[in-house]
């Protein structure tokens, strides 16, 4: 094979990875076959030859039974770098198949935030056995991390970081980093935090600035002030907002006395943003994140409660229709046209709701602009109502040869789209004010409002005008 052919193949492979093609399905099939044949060597070699993230992708495509079997056959293939990349469901299946010593060895190779997440997946008795296998300093850090709330900054922070005093020069800092033991430094870092003698962070030096500066330049001359400081109790969504707002590569975490205790890296925040956005999208549909390994029963349990709530609201809307049954029985056209009003209102409400939930999550809605945003949604609903009232009115007139019916449905369309705009913004804002998650509960209330109001207004106007 020519050198040019080799080069072309390398370029193709690199291009596929850059575009996120992912792991070849043949690799997954190879692992499945090796598990079925109980070929531990093949399982271990296949996973070891992959990048840890790709190895995790392969494991996540296996069934729960296959994952557990693979972990029992080749525990060495499930090191800390692979476990850190696994989804919660796959991680739970793997740790159930490893013994305390194997899990402890994996923890020793993990960053502290990933290790805390792993230990949290263990039941109480098994967790105690794993902790006993760890060195006292690592065990103490893990126990301290577990004391923080699940979605707090304390769960995200790493305990390894690099610091220096202001009076040092770049030469002293570089020599300090070079001479420090590898296990005392983080695997990856982008900034060095400048601290006072009391260990209070006062600024940071980016590695890019450090490499450009003369060796005798004082750190104080190339230091930049801290744009954001995080406390362990801060919610991870608030931390992600700071990273997004200030374009941070990392952020220092300080205790209640302002002393530096850890740092949070951008890679962890990317995961938080992905998790939070996924949760919001799924919550708007009334479902949770069903993993590939979830059973039918688990999926049904997660979705059935929301369908039950929707059934109750649908019965409420049907009750409104039933209360106007004498009118509907006399004018059949009302039964044909009523769903149009409700459907248009529901879609309009969902549009406003999606925008509102996203704006709340990204902190775009504040006390300074909330009135303007509410007014914008009111005007949007009003104008859309006028547009579609003008469209549906003539259609109803031609369809049923009745000017009064066209007037009724036009007016009902205008009112319902106005209500939909209001509900789309006010419902999530109201839920947020009372401490509820707008993404989870808003859709039920908005849909109920548009259905009930749509049917009531349309049929109520028909009763007044047509009878």
Image: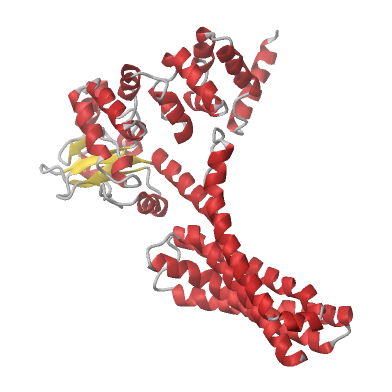
Which of the two residues, 72 or 270, is positioned nearer the viewer here? Answer: 72
Where residue 438 sits in the image (x, y, percent)?
Answer: 47, 62
Identify the residue shown where x is 50% and y is 27%. Answer: 56
The image shows residue 224, relative to residue 296, as above or below, that is below
Q: Which quarter of the picture shows residue 157?
A: top left
The quarter of the rendered structure image containing the N terminus is: top right
Q: Is residue 210 left or right of residue 1?
A: left
Q: Position of residue 128 (x, y in %)?
A: 25, 27
326 vs 361: above or below:
below
The color scheme shown is secondary structure
Q: Quadrant of the image for the C terminus?
A: bottom right
Q: Is residue 182 visible in the rendered structure shown here?
A: yes
Residue 34 rendering spot, x and y as whole percentages? 57, 12
Q: Is residue 285 visible?
A: no
Q: Quadrant of residue 307?
A: bottom right
Residue 444 position in % (x across, y down): 55, 63
Between 243 and 317, the one nearer to me in the picture: 317
Q: Residue at x 17, y 50 (%)?
A: 256
Which corner quadrant of the image does residue 267 belong to? top left
Residue at (39% x, 19% y) in the render: 98
């Amino acid at each position: 094979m020519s050198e040019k052919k080799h080069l072309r193949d390398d370029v193709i492979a690199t291009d596929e990875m850059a575009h996120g093609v992912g792991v070849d399905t043949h690799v997954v099939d190879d692992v499945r076959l090796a598990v079925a044949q109980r070929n531990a060597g093949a399982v271990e070699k296949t996973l070891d030859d992959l990048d840890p993230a790709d190895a995790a992708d392969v494991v996540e495509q296996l069934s729960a039974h296959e994952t557990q079997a693979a972990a029992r056959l080749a525990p060495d293939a499930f090191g800390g770098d692979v476990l850190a990349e696994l989804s919660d469901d796959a991680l739970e299946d793997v740790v159930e198949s490893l013994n305390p010593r194997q899990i402890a060895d994996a923890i020793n190779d993990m960053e502290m935030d990933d290790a805390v997440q792993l230990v949290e997946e263990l039941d109480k008795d098994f967790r105690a056995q794993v902790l006993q296998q760890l060195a006292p300093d690592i065990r103490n850090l893990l126990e301290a991390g577990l004391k923080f709330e699940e979605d707090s900054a304390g769960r995200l922070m790493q305990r390894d970081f690099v610091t220096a005093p202001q009076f040092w020069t770049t030469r002293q800092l570089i020599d300090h980093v070079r001479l420090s033991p590898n296990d005392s430094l983080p695997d990856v870092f982008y900034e060095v935090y400048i601290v006072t003698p009391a260990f209070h962070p006062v600024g940071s030096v980016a590695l890019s600035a450090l490499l450009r500066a003369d060796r005798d330049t004082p750190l104080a001359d190339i230091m930049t002030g801290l744009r954001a400081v995080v406390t362990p109790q801060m919610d991870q969504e608030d931390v992600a907002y700071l990273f997004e707002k200030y374009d941070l590569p990392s952020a220092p975490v300080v205790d209640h006395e302002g002393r530096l205790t850890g740092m949070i890296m951008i890679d962890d925040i990317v995961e938080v943003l992905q998790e939070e956005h996924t949760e919001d999208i799924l919550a708007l549909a009334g479902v949770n994140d069903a993993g590939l390994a979830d059973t039918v029963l688990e999926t049904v349990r997660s979705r059935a409660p929301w369908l039950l709530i929707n059934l109750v609201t649908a019965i409420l809307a049907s009750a409104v229709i039933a209360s106007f049954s004498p009118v509907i029985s006399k004018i059949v056209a009302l039964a044909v046209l009523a769903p149009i009003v409700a459907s248009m209102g529901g879609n309009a409400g969902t549009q406003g709701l999606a925008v509102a939930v996203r704006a709340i999550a990204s902190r775009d809605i504040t006390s300074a602009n909330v009135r303007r945003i509410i007014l914008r949604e009111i005007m949007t609903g009003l104008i859309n109502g006028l547009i579609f009232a003008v469209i549906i009115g003539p259609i109803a007139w031609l369809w049923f040869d009745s000017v009064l019916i066209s007037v009724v449905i036009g007016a009902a369309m205008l009112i319902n789209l106005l209500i939909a705009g209001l509900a789309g913004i006010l419902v999530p804002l109201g839920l947020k004010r009372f401490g509820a998650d707008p993404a989870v509960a808003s859709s039920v209330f908005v849909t109920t409002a548009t259905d009930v109001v749509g049917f009531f207004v349309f049929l109520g106007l028909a009763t007044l005008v047509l009878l």
